[in-house]
Image (spheres, rainbow, N blue to C red):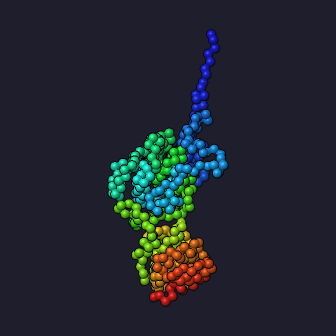
């Protein structure tokens, strides 16, 4: 008998290899065996089994539309055509994105439930489809009928907008590749799933791989995409931290649910500056941009009431004037309460200690409450002086002059430290009709028309100036 030979093809020999790994749902670290506690982040019962498939090295790679420009070349020879920024909804959204929407970018939008993420992105998609080209809104949480009802409630009827209700990311990617819209919104990344990954939707592996495939498609086609992301109870984007590293920009929609104002804050942007802020008002017709937020936040200020002061804070490149309210009340409790709304609690405790030690205010038997009006959250130290002045005003029952603005960082020894971009802050205060401003000494401030600038060295001098002659 003749010999019998079997010739295996390359495709048959290079089969995909599989292995079982355990992925932490908090930090996305990978382990070869199950453990009760993740060795990297210390979280208990967070390791989930996952089957990982490694494709053979000989598998053909999908053609990439950008292959022509991914080869090494001289900087002067790199083509830039087709990468001009695209217009989006209004000046506020445009500012946060750094001047417009970059083709092929992947933008993650996060925020608390009910804060208005879907409403804002519905408006963005409707405006984009009317001004630029077809926009596709993919919802894995709502039906397409619910999307249409929301659009009708906001008075929107875009002719070229596409809606698609689907949870399978494989089907979503196929439809995007077929229809080729000019922009895509995926609501949300935690509710879509890939069929070749065994874990549930919202898990670390699903979120990470789903974001990677959307990013790959966005770069290949040049279609900009928005992803809606859920947040944890701490306020951070839910899922692995690597999700924020994958995307090009991360935007947070902030604000108190029972206040009408919302802040869209950029915390990461590969195509523009970070910490830019856009201000919107939540109405029945959707998000309406606020062009002069300082005037809005001060519209209902209680003039002539002790415990109220105006801080000049800076959100990104925009100066904002906000009202700081404080209330002190004698308590019989051995441990007086300290409550801050919209202001860092640790910083408030530090200011109370400075006022007690350096200014001589006996706050040891006082409940102290601090509130930032309008639902804003202030994190920069430039508001220290206004908070300290408001607490002292309430304790001494003396009002701060209604035309006085305060800015400056308070140190532990009671000194005042200068803050950045003081000239821009003072110019904004003068534009809104303020006559005086108390600032740290030695900041090198130019004179501002119509504004008397008082420079002081310490918080004691600042409070004396702020409360002088007021009852």
Q: Quadrant of residue 17?
A: top right
252 or 130: nearer the viewer: 130
Q: Residue at x 42, y 77 (%)?
A: 301
Residue furthest bottom in the image: 469
Is residue 84 or residue 395 the one in the foreground? 84
Residue 329, relative to residue 200: is it above or below?
A: below
Count of numbered circles on the image: 0
x and y percentages locating residue 13 in the rendered image: 60, 28
Residue at point 38% right, 60% down? 286
Q: Is residue 91 left or right of residue 458?
A: left
Please tell me whether residue 60 is drawn above or below residue 410 in the rendered image: above
Q: Is residue 43 visible?
A: no
Frontmost residue, 81 versus 340: 81
In the picture, which quadrant includes the N terminus? Answer: top right
Q: Residue at x 53, y 44 (%)?
A: 220
Question: In the image, residue 61 lies at what x, y percent?
Answer: 57, 37
The percent position of residue 313, horizontal first and vertical second, equals 52, 72
Residue farthest top in this picture: 1
Q: Is residue 325 above or below residue 168?
A: below
**Where does residue 281 sit, x and y in percent of width and height?**
41, 65
Q: Quadrant of the C terminus?
A: bottom left
Whether 10 is drawn above or below 443: the answer is above
Is residue 180 shown left or right of residue 416? left
Could you tell whether 444 is left or right of 215 in the image?
right
The answer to whether residue 452 of the structure is visible from this angle is yes
Residue drawn at the location 40% of the way across and 67% of the way down: 259
Asked whether 200 or 224 is in front, the reply is 224
């Amino acid at each position: 008998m003749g010999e019998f030979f079997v010739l295996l093809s390359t495709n048959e020999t290079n089969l995909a290899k599989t292995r079982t790994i355990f992925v932490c749902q908090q930090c996305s670290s990978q382990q070869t065996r199950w453990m009760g506690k993740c060795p990297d982040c210390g979280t208990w019962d967070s390791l989930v089994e996952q089957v990982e498939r490694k494709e053979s090295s000989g598998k053909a790679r999908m053609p990439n539309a950008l292959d022509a420009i991914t080869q090494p070349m001289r900087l002067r020879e790199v083509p830039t055509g087709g990468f001009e920024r695209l217009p989006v909804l209004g000046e506020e959204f445009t500012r946060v994105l750094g001047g417009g929407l970059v083709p092929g970018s992947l933008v993650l939008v996060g925020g608390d439930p009910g804060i208005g993420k879907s409403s804002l992105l519905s408006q963005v998609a409707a405006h984009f489809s009317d001004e630029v080209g077809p926009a596709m809104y993919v919802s894995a949480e709502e039906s397409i009928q619910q999307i249409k009802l929301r659009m009708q409630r906001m008075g929107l009827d875009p002719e070229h907008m596409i809606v698609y209700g689907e949870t399978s990311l494989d089907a979503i990617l196929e439809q995007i590749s077929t229809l080729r819209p000019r922009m895509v919104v995926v609501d949300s990344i935690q509710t879509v799933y890939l069929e070749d990954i065994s874990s549930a939707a919202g898990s670390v592996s699903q979120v990470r791989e789903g974001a990677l495939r959307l990013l790959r498609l966005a770069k290949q086609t040049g279609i900009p995409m928005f992803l809606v992301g859920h947040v944890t109870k701490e306020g951070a984007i839910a899922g692995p931290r690597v999700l924020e590293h994958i995307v090009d920009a991360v935007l947070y929609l902030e604000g108190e649910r029972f206040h009408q104002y919302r802040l869209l804050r950029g915390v990461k942007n590969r195509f523009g500056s970070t910490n830019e802020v856009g201000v919107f008002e939540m109405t029945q017709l959707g998000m309406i941009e606020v062009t002069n937020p300082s005037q809005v936040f001060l519209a209902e200020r209680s003039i002539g009431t002790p415990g109220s002061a105006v801080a000049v804070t800076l959100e990104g490149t925009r100066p904002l004037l906000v009202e700081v309210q404080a209330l002190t009340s004698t308590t019989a409790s051995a441990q007086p309460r300290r409550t801050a709304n919209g202001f860092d609690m640790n910083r408030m405790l530090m200011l109370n200690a400075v006022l007690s030690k350096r200014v001589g205010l006996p706050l040891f038997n006082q409940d102290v409450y601090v509130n930032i009006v309008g639902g804003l959250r202030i994190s920069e130290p430039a508001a220290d002086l206004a908070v300290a002045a408001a607490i002292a005003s309430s304790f001494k029952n003396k009002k701060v002059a209604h035309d006085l603005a305060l800015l400056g960082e308070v140190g532990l020894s009671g000194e005042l430290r200068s803050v950045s971009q003081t000239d821009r802050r003072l110019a904004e205060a003068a534009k809104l009709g303020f006559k005086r401003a108390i600032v740290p000494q030695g900041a090198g401030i130019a004179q501002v028309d119509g504004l008397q600038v008082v420079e002081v060295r310490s918080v004691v001098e600042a409070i004396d100036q702020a409360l002088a002659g007021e009852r």
